[in-house]
Image (cartoon, rainbow, N blue to C red):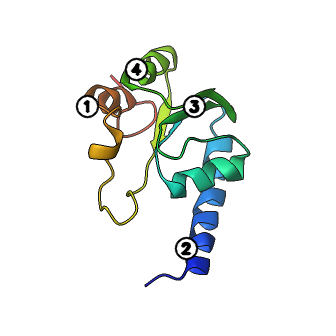
Amino acid sequence: MISEAEDAQTKADIAAWLAEQIAAQPGTLVLLGPGSTVQAVAEHLGVSKTLLGIDALLGGESVGQDLCETGLLELLHRHDRAVMILSPIGAQGFVLGRGNLQISPAVVRRIGSTPGTRP
């Protein structure tokens, strides 16, 4: 079992690494999924994040919070490059599904599997 201190350090390490990746791509729309691990990323970046919602950043600034599928698709339509940061939802064992239905198949297709490869 992971101790609370180890869990906090792991989240901090993940957040620091992802912050570097995000800073290296200032023109990329960054969608932050739900959960405390992704919230740690937002905290490291100094931006507000809804714990259970999908939020969006561009150039380190918030451009949307608690977005629904329509809001996500509108942002994705306006921005050529996008990435989504997700993690398994604590002890539930899923990344996409019940807790984040706004990340629809249409949203996933628009993002693509690698930045810059969207249809």
Which one is closest to the eye, mark 4 or mark 2? Answer: 2
Q: Amino acid at mark 1?
A: Pro
Helix, strand or loop status at disc 3: loop
Helix, strand or loop status at disc 4: helix
Q: Residues within 10 Å of mark 2 (few under 14, many from 20)?
A: few
Q: Which residue is mark 3?
A: 28
Q: Amino acid at mark 3?
A: Thr
- Distance from disc 4 to disc 2, alpha carbons, whole Å, reads 33 Å
Q: Amino acid at mark 4?
A: Leu
Residue visible at 38% across and 57% down in the picture: 89
Q: Nearer the viewer, residue 91 or 57?
A: 91
Question: Where's residue 7, x and y in %?
Answer: 55, 73
Q: Residues within 10 Å of mark 4 (few under 14, many from 20)?
A: many
- In primary-sequence order, the first of circles 1 and 3 is 3
> Where does the N terminus fall, quadrant-wise?
bottom left
Q: Which residue is mark 2?
A: 7
Question: Where's residue 39, x and y in %?
Answer: 58, 51
Q: Residues within 10 Å of mark 1 (few under 14, many from 20)?
A: few
- In primary-sequence order, the first of circles 1 and 2 is 2
Q: Which residue is mark 1?
A: 105
* In the rendered image, the vertical position of residue 96 relative to residue 60, given as above or below: below
Asked if labels 2 and 3 touch by Cβ distance under 8 angstroms, the answer is no
Position of residue 49 in the picture relative to residue 33 (left or right): right
Which one is closest to the eye, mark 3 or mark 4? Answer: 4
- Distance from disc 3 to disc 4, alpha carbons, whole Å, reads 15 Å
* In the rendered image, the vertical position of residue 44 relative to residue 63, given as above or below: below
Disc assigned to residue 73: 4
